[in-house]
Amino acid sequence: MSDLVKSLGVEHMLDRPDAVPYGKLRVGDTVRVHFRIVEGSRERLQAFQGVVIAVNPGTSDANFAVRRTGAHGVGVERIFPIHSPRLEQLEILRHAHVRRARLYYLRERTGKRARLREKRRFAAVARAEPEANAES
């Protein structure tokens, strides 16, 4: 890749709005991606909600893959460039506890087997509540 393309990519990366929290994006997160789609002369936003199965970091060519189960149990995956001007908004809905960097094994799983365990944020607070109730 030429130096001109790299410099343009870095400039765009620095001008990126805070609507895309790519620093907080992790594998196993359930996200809703709002992506701008061009159909002929019209533009519209399309939301794509699913689980992040891979994150490929980098400077200007970073991307992440999102997988969801579509109609009739068909799996759909999309790869989104993080620094794309078409990426309008990225909402992180929930975090999951995962032990791998890539969740490609979800491709073979369906139904309950494809679920991920949700990550608990406030474990210390949850442990303190039953003790307080036992004393009363």
Image (cartoon, grey):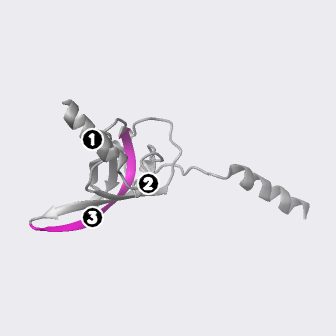
Instruction: Name the front one of labels 3 and 1.
Output: 1
Q: Secondary structure at mark 2?
A: strand
Counting from the top left corner in percent of width and height, residue 95 is at 51, 51
- For disc 1, the marked residue is 9
* Residue type at tag 3: Gln
* Residue sitting at x 44%, y 52%: 21
Q: Is residue 12 magenta?
A: no
- For disc 2, the marked residue is 30
Q: Quadrant of the N terminus?
A: top left
- For disc 3, the marked residue is 46
* Residue sitting at x 54%, y 52%: 118
* Residue type at tag 2: Thr
Between the residue at mark 3 and the residue at mark 1, the CA separation in whole angstroms equals 24 Å
Counting from the top left corner in percent of width and height, residue 113 is at 44, 48
Mark 3 or mark 1: name the one nearer the start of the chain: 1
Magenta stretch: dominant secondary structure: strand
Between the residue at mark 3 and the residue at mark 2, the CA separation in whole angstroms equals 16 Å
10 on left or right of 101: left
Q: Secondary structure at mark 1?
A: helix
Between the residue at mark 1 and the residue at mark 2, the CA separation in whole angstroms equals 27 Å
